[in-house]
Image (spheres, rainbow, N blue to C red):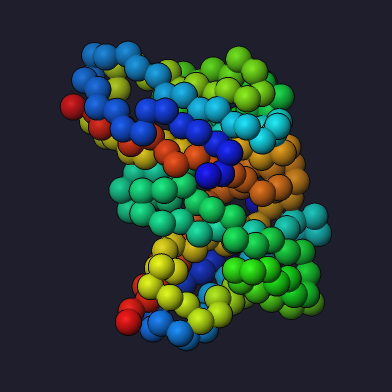
């Protein structure tokens, strides 16, 4: 499994755009990149998944450069309710996903 | 509502008790998982079931015993637990084993006294 590295924590203010970058230098050809969000005392929730270039949904955007050795989750105009832990996972379709420590995002008013 | 339901949400048990955690998924998925999350620690993958067959057991002590009677239900039987087993136990499912989107339940908070 490709190992991922992401910042332990980030701080932001309401209304700002937040970009969380994840490094995965050993990503394999078949691996997808998936981001999850977890609030305290709840299970993680799927945010977005991508393989290359850019993916956008109603919640976030995911930017993946051509070499796929990193990815950036972009949260537009965050609010207090976006305070959570964000996990970057990399894996192919045949392996269960292993969660790291994630990035704790704190949004203040 | 993720389509994965866990019961009970909270459980307090003594070290000599036997209890079970239940998970049910209404998504038609083929793979189900048990994860453990202790305070301020990453999620730990415990067991993986694919088409009702256990395919992974990540060195989990035998006091945790999983059961998957069909593709929609997953149990975690608990016996002679230790206080350090107190944690949030999360059930999850995915269409197939691995990198597809995983859907988690709300979790079962377990306290061992």
Q: Residue at x 66, y 35 (%)?
A: B27
Q: Residue at x 46, y 18 (%)?
A: B65
Q: Quadrant of residue A19?
A: bottom right
Percent position (x, y) of residue A104?
Answer: 40, 67
Percent position (x, y) of residue B36?
Answer: 42, 38
> Count the marks: how many?
0
Placement of the C terminus of chain A among the 4 image quadrants: bottom left
Q: Quadrant of residue A52?
A: bottom right
Can you say whether A5 is above or below B84 in the image?
below
Q: Is residue A70 left or right of residue B46?
A: right
Q: Quadrant of residue B83?
A: top left
Percent position (x, y) of residue B97?
Answer: 70, 37
Can you say whether B38 is above or below B81 in the image?
below
Q: Is residue B19 left or right of residue B59?
A: left
Specify whether residue A67 is in view. no
Can you say whether A32 is above or below B38 in the image?
below
């Amino acid at each position: 499994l490709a190992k991922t590295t992401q910042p332990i924590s980030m701080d932001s203010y309401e209304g700002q755009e937040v970009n969380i970058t994840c490094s995965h230098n050993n990503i394999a050809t078949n691996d997808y990149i998936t981001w999850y969000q977890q609030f305290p005392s709840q299970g993680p929730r799927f945010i977005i998944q991508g393989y290359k270039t850019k993916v956008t949904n109603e919640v976030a955007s995911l930017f993946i450069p051509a070499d796929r050795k990193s990815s950036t989750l972009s949260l537009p105009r965050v609010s207090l309710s976006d305070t959570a832990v964000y996990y970057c996972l990399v894996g192919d379709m045949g392996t269960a996903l292993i969660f790291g420590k994630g990035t704790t995002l704190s949004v203040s008013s | 509502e993720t389509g994965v339901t866990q019961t009970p949400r909270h459980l307090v048990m003594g070290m000599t008790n036997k209890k079970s955690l239940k998970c049910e998924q209404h998504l038609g998925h083929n793979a189900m998982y048990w994860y453990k999350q202790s305070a301020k620690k990453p999620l730990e993958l415990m067991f993986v079931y694919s088409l009702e067959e256990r395919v992974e057991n990540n060195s989990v002590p035998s006091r945790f015993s999983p059961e998957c009677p069909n593709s929609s239900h997953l149990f975690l039987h608990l016996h002679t637990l230790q206080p350090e087993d107190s944690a949030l136990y999360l059930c999850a499912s995915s269409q197939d084993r691995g990198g597809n989107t995983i859907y988690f339940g709300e979790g079962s908070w377990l306290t061992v006294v």
